[in-house]
Image (spheres, rainbow, N blue to C red):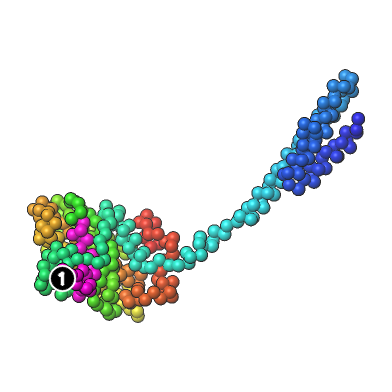
């Protein structure tokens, strides 16, 4: 019989030399497979006489143990190398943007709309929508502005071409028609906000022909002006992320609310910068009031039973205030330099728990 030490060398060297798991498996089969050299030698033990069998068996068993240990060692080493290699090959640089296009920015108006939805959502409001192209009834008549009503001139309206029946669609001048559409669509109570585009023939440093508003509407039993003030103050504190916001309620007039008020936010304009909550200046951010009984009757609600408040807030205005953006017109210039400066990263998703603007 072959010298055990020599055999051991012949069986172990391919194990040590195996460059991958396949070669290692071949070395294992050559020694320990059905027709492996060690297997065959073990099988041959029966032909030996008792004394010799004992010696050879213990030598072969010792070899088998060492071979097993060598196979295991080599397997672990090869697996570690394979793992290392695939980790290296599949490495992801998590400091890179997830996708190249995420170097784009979220427009401040979109960001602020998300913030508004987050804040009112936490107060139990849901989001309602209406069309940008409205009819006269929803934009005016149902809001207590019958034809020839002088208040229609308060809002310089973009009209579409007259239709054969003489009626003209228009670009909604405010989000208030969504109040009507909401109340037409289902029974009270209501607690909605309606953000969206609005249009007026107007253009200067603080007015653009297209701008954004968010309407608020709460109708229930026993709603009063105190609820309106409370909601708006809670909103302003959450939105501007301050303990107290300088706010001013001025008596005003809207045909669809009675009483009506306009709300200003205290601000400071200095060297092209705009700061919120300090200073002697005021910026008007919203109109509001208790929904007029005539509006409620227009949608079939009994004003003796149902009351509530509404407000319409300028989204662009409060975005300017919060983020210190001096000129409204720049919002709609599509200037990439402006957007890179004032825009938000795609992952800056507003949430109340982490602080809205972080
Ligand atoms: N729709 C009014 C405007 O655009 C704002 C407003 C909304 C006022 C709701 C009162 C109630 O000026």
Residue 66 seen in the current view: no
Residue 30 locus on image (x, y percent)? 80, 37
Residue 322 locus on image (x, y percent)? 33, 68
- Report crowding for label 1: few under 14, some 14 to 19, many 20 or more residues within 10 A (C-alpha): few
Q: Is residue 170 magenta?
A: yes
* Location of mark 1 (residue): 166
Range covered by the magenta-colored residues: 156-183
Left or right, 111 with reference to 13: left
Name the residue located 54 percent from the left edge and 61 percent from the top edge.
95
Ligand 1 has an atom within 8 Å of the beta carbon of the residue at disc 1 = no
Helix, strand or loop: magenta stretch:
loop
Q: Is residue 223 magenta?
A: no
Name the residue located 88 percent from the left edge and 19 percent from the top edge.
50
Work out whether residue 123 or residue 10 is closer to the camera in this orientation and state it: 10
Residue 131 versus residue 199 in the image, above or below: above
Residue 16 locus on image (x, y percent)? 79, 44
Work out whether residue 135 or residue 265 is closer to the camera in this orientation and state it: 135
């Amino acid at each position: 019989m072959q010298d055990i030490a020599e055999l051991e060398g012949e069986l172990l060297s391919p194990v040590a030399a195996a460059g991958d798991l396949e070669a290692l498996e071949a070395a294992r089969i050559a020694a320990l497979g059905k027709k492996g050299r060690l297997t065959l030698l073990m099988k041959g033990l029966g032909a030996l006489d008792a004394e010799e069998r004992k010696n050879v068996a213990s030598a072969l068993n010792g070899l088998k143990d060492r071979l097993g240990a060598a196979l295991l060692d080599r397997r672990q080493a090869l697996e570690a190398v394979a793992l290392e290699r695939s980790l290296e090959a599949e490495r992801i640089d998590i400091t890179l943007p997830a996708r190249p296009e995420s170097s784009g920015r979220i427009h401040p108006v979109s960001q602020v709309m998300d913030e508004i939805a987050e804040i009112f959502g936490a107060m139990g409001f849901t989001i309602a929508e209406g069309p940008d192209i409205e009819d006269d009834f929803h934009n005016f008549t149902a809001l207590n502005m019958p034809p020839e009503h002088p208040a229609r001139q308060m809002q310089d309206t973009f009209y579409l071409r007259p239709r054969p029946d003489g009626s003209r669609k228009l670009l909604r001048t405010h989000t208030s028609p969504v109040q009507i559409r909401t109340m037409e669509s289902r029974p009270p109570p209501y607690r909605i906000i309606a953000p969206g585009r609005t249009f007026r023939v107007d253009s200067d440093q603080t007015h653009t022909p297209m701008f954004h508003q968010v309407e608020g509407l709460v109708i229930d039993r026993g709603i009063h002006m105190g609820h309106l003030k409370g909601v708006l103050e809670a909103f302003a504190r959450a939105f501007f992320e301050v303990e107290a916001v300088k706010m001013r309620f001025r008596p005003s007039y809207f045909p669809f609310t009675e009483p009506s008020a306009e709300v200003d936010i205290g601000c400071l304009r200095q060297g092209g910068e705009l700061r919120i909550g300090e200073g002697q200046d005021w910026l008007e951010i919203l109109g509001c009031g208790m929904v007029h009984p005539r509006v409620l009757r227009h949608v079939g609600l009994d004003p003796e039973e149902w009351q509530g408040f509404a407000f319409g807030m300028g989204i662009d205005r409060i975005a300017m205030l919060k983020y210190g953006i001096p000129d409204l017109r720049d919002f709609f210039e599509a200037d990439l330099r402006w957007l890179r400066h004032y825009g938000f990263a795609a992952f800056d998703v507003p949430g109340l728990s982490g602080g809205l603007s972080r």
